Image (cartoon, coloured by chain):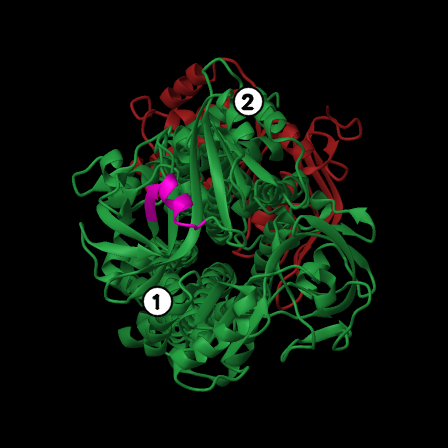
Chain colours: A green, B red
Amino acid sequence: MAEAPLALRLAARELRAGFRGFWIFLACIALGVAAIAAAGSTAQAFRMGLASQAREIVGGDLAVTIQQRQFAPAEQAALGRIGAVSYAVAVRAMAEAPSGERRLVELRGVSGAWPLAGKVELAGGRSLRQALTPSGPAAGAAVEAPLLDRMGLHLGDRFMVGNAPVAVQAILVSEPDRLARGFTLGPSVLTRLKTVIDGGFLGAGIPFSETARIAIPAWESLGEARARVRRALGREPLGGGYRIRDRNDAAPGVRHLIDQLEYFLGFIGLASLAAGGLGVAGAVNAHLEASKGDIAILKVFGAGGALVRDIHLIQIGSMAAVGIVIGLAVGAAIPPLLGATVAASLPVPALFGVYPWPLIKAAAFGLLSTAAFALISLGRARASSPSVLLRRDVADPPAMGVELLAASCAALALAALAVVSAPTPAAAAVMIGGAAAAFALLWVLGWGAASAAGRLRAGTRGPLRMGLANLAGPRSAARTATPSVGLGVALVTTVVLIQSSLIAQVAAVAPRTAPALIFTEIPAARGAEYDRAVARAFGRPLSSADYLRAPFATGRIVKVRGAAIERARIDRSRRWAYDNDISLSVIGPEPPLADVVSGRWWPTNYSGPPLAALSQDAASGADIKVGDTIGIAVLGREIDARVAALRKVEYAGFGANFPLVLDPAALAGAELSNVAIAKASGAEEARVARALGRDFPSVNVISVRDQLKAAADLFGRLALAVRAVASVVAVSGVLVLVGAIAAGARERAREAAILEVLGATRAQVLAASGIEYGAVGLIAGTAGVGLGYLAAWPAVVEVFRADWSVDWAAIAVLLAASPAVAAAGGLIAAGQALRRRPARALRGS
Amino acid sequence: MLDATLPGAALSLEGVSLTLASPAGPVQILRGVDFSVAAGERVAVLGPSGCGKSSMIAVAAGLERPSRGLVRLLGRDLAPLGEDERALLRRGAVTLVFQAFHLLANMTAEENIAAPLEIAGERGAGAKARDWLARVGLERRGGHYPHQLSGGEQQRVALARAMAAGPRLLFADEPTGNLDAANAGHVADLMFAMAAETGAALVLVTHEESLAARADRRVAMADGRMVADG
C-alpha cells in the first residue's frame, strides 16, 4: 500500500468526470440499500413505539394473568404490597340484541383502578367512570362499534350478555392494553368487574382469565418486583398457573411480527441487491472497458497492476459510497413519510426517526454486495495487458487473484449477515439458498440462450437474423439481463402465487371445508339435549357430515418418555404444541376421517391404561413415536398415556380436529364441557344462533364465516402493498436491462449506421432490436414465472398448509409484461441509435 | 543494467516470433525477428500495414510476450519478468508515443505529463510537467483536457509525457499518422530534437520516407520478418 497516496491522487482526478456511466450502478445499489434501510427503520420505529408505550400496553409495569380462577384475597393483599394494582377479567360470552340477533363478545370486567397506565378512549361524551356506572338494573358498559353495527344498537340502547342486562353508555374506541391481549374472537364489551362476577360469567367450567396489573414504585426494579410476585403466588402449579409479563416484554407476539416484517422487507431489498448486482458488475465492466486505454497507458509508463486496480477500486468504492448514501437517505426518509400518511390507521404505535443500526446494517449489505459483484472485474484491470494499445482484439486474461478471493469472501459474508440477522436463521438460509440457486440457474439459462441464438441464426434472415446475432454476440443482453429480470419476475410470481392461494383458501376453500359455526361451553350433562336443540334450530336432521360434538379440555404435554420436555431443544416451528396448553378431547370409537397414519385407534369400550392419539405435527416436535409414553397435565393433575396412534389433523377441515385425543377411561369421572361444530348457510347461522339463545344462553356461538371474511378482507388489503414491495426486485431487473442497453448504445449506433449504409430500413433495424430484447424478456419472464411457481408451491402446501391455487390472470400478465417491457426497451434503444446520422455515428466509432 | 555481451545496447531481439490465437486459428505475426538498437541510436522501422511493426514494438517494450526468442530491454532479459516487473523496468526509462495519442481522458494536459513522473515517485512532478508543456509550446494549455486540444496539440502533450521522465529508449508508433503535414512536421522536429538532447534511443515506426530519412538507421519489415537493415 506504499502507493496508496498516488492511487488516491490519480483516482481523484478520474472522479472529476462525475457519474458518467455510473447511473445504473448508483441506482442498483441505492434501490437495494433503500429497501433494506426502509425495512429496518420501519421495524425499529415500531419497536421504539412499542417500547415508548410499553407501560400503557402492559397496563402497568407488570401484568400477572391466571386462568380459570380469580386471585385469592391473600394473593391480592400480597400483590397490593408490591404496588398499585388493577384487576381485569376476560371471558367470552354471547350478546343478544332486543331483535334476537346474537353475537360472541369478549366481556371484560375491570376494577376501579383500571387502567393504571394509558388512557381509555371513548366516544359518546362520558368518562370511563360514568360509562361503567350501572343504569338501573342494567350494567353500564363501553362497547366497540362493530358490535353495535352488527346488532343494530345505538348509544343508550340495552342488550343482554348472557343473562345480564347491559346499557351502552359509551363507544369503546381504544384501550391502552389492547395490543398486549392479542387476537380476540369478538368485539369488546367493557364493564365493571363486579358485573361480570355477579352475572355468573366466572362459573366452574367456563374459560376465563384474570389479570392483575401492577404499577411499581419508581425505586423498585422490575426484577425484584417479579420475584415478589413469584413469592406471592407460590410455585408454578401444573399446566402453567400464571404468566408474568413486564414492560420490557410488552407484546411479544407483535414484536415477533415486526421481526418477520423486517425480514420479509429486508429480503426483498437483499434480492434487489442481488438482482441489481449484475447491473453493478455490468457498469464496472463498461467503465473498465472504456478505461482500457487509460489502464494500458498507465502500465506502459510503469504503473504496476496493483496500482491500476487500486485506482479503479477507489473510484468504484467512491461511487458505491455515493449509491449507499443515496439509498440510506431514501430508506431513512420513506418510513416517516409513509407513517405520516397512514398514522391514523397504524395498528401498532410507531416512533419514526433516524435510527443508526438499521442504516449501518443496510450500508453493510450494500458494501458487501458491491464488493461481491465488482471485485472480480477489478481483477481484470490488474491483470490486463497493456498491448491493448497496439491491438484492439486483446482478450483480458482470467483474473484468478486476490480479487476473486475477496469477492467470494464478500458474497459469503453477505449471505452470513443475512442469515444471522434474520429472526429465523434456518428459514432465511433456505430463502437465500433458493435465491442464489435461482440466480445461478438463470445465469446458465442466459448463457445457454445466447449460445442457442448463435446456432439458430443460421436458418434465418433479415431482422430475425440480426436480432439473433446480437443475442449471441459478445454484448448479448441475454447473458447480462436474464438473471436479474428473471429473479425479479420469480420473486413477484412467488408472492403473487402465495397470496392468491391464501386468499382463495380463506375466501373459497375454507368456507367449503371448514365448519361455519363453532359452539363452545356446552354443559356436559346436556349434550344430547343440545344435539336435539341444534337439529330443531336447523329444521332438518343432522348427520356426522354436518354436525359433530365432542368433550373438550385443554392440557399440556409436559413429559416424553419419562423425561420433562425441554422446549429450547424443539424446533421453533413445531414448538406450538409445547409452548401452551393445547386442546384435547376424549373420544371412544374411532371417529370418521380420523386419518390415523401410524398405530391403531383403541377399541370401543377400552378400559385399560390411558391411551392417546396425537397429531403427527405435534408429535414431530418432540420426536414422539407410537408406543412412547407422554405425561399430560390436564384438569390439575398429570396423567401418563401411551401413544396408540399418530394422525393427520386438518385443522381447517370438518372433523374431530384436536391435536390430542385420549380414550374416555383416561379422564373418567371428569365432567368436561363439550364443543360442537356445524356446517350452515348464512341464513341458518343467524337462525341457529337466535334459537339456541333461549335454551342455552351460556353456549358461545362462534361464526367462522365472520372470521374468514375478516381474514380475507385483511389479505385483500395487504395484497397490493406486498406485491408493490416485491416489485422492487423487478425494478432492479429492469435497471439491469436498461444498463445492458445503455452499455451497448454506442456499438448499437455504429451497427445501425452500418446497416443503414448497407440499405436496411429503419423498420428492419427496429425489428431486430425488438426481437433481441423481447427474446431476453421472454426467456427471463418464462423462467422467472417457472421458478416462482416452484418456490411458491412448497410454501403454500407445506408451510401454510393451504390448497394450491393459481392466479392465472396475474401469471398471464407477468408472462406478457416481461417480453413487452424488454422489447419496448430494445425499440427505444434502437430508436435512439437511429437518431444519429449514419456518417456521424461511423465517424465517432 | 546493460548486458555485458551487448555493450551499450538499449534493445535487442533475437529470433523473436509471435503467434496469436484467433477464431480462424493461430496467426503468425512475427517470424524470427532479429533486431537491436544501440544506446542513443535513432532507428526507423518501415513496412506495409500488417507486416508486424506495431507487434514488434509491443514485444520489444515488454507489452507482449513473444512465442519464441529472446528480448533484452536495457540489457534485461524480459522472459523471466512478470507483468509488474516489466512495468518497473519501463518506469522512467522506456516510453512510448502512439499514433492515437492515448492521453488519459480525465486528466488535464499538465496532469497527463505529470502522471508517469508521479508513478516513478519523482518529486516536483507538477513543475517538471509545466516545464515540458512550455517546451512543446503548450504552456497556456496545461489546464485543458485532451478533448479540448487539437490532434497536433494532443500529440505534443503525448511527446512531452514520453520525454519528461528522461527515458533511455523511446518507441514511437507512427506518431504523425493522425496529423496534417504542418503538425506532423512540428511533432517530428520536437521528437528528434528531444531525443538528441536527452540522448535517448529512438525506435520510430513510420510509413513516411521523409521521416525515416531523419533516423540514423532504417530497417524494413515484411510479413513478420526483418527484410532490410541499414
Q: Nearer the viewer, mark 1 or mark 2?
A: 2
Please, what secondary structure does the residue beneath circle 2 have?
Answer: helix
Amino acid at circle 2: Ala
Q: Residue furthest front?
A: A137
> Considering depth in this image, is A72 or A619 the residue closer to the camera?
A72
| Disc marking residue A499 | none
> Considering depth in this image, is B105 or B212 the residue closer to the camera?
B105
Mark 1 Cα shell of 10 Å, populated few (<14), some (14-19), many (≥20): some
Q: Earlier in the sequence, mark 1 or mark 2?
A: 2
Residue A776: image x %, image y %? 45, 69
Badge 2 is on which residue? A225
At a point 73% along the width and 26% down the height, the residue shown is: B2
Do the residues bearing badges 1 and 2 touch, measured as CB atoms within 8 Å? no
Above or below: residue A701 compared with residue A592: above
Is residue A497 found left or right of A376 in the rendered image?
left
| Disc marking residue A821 | 1
> Considering depth in this image, is A643 or A717 the residue closer to the camera?
A643
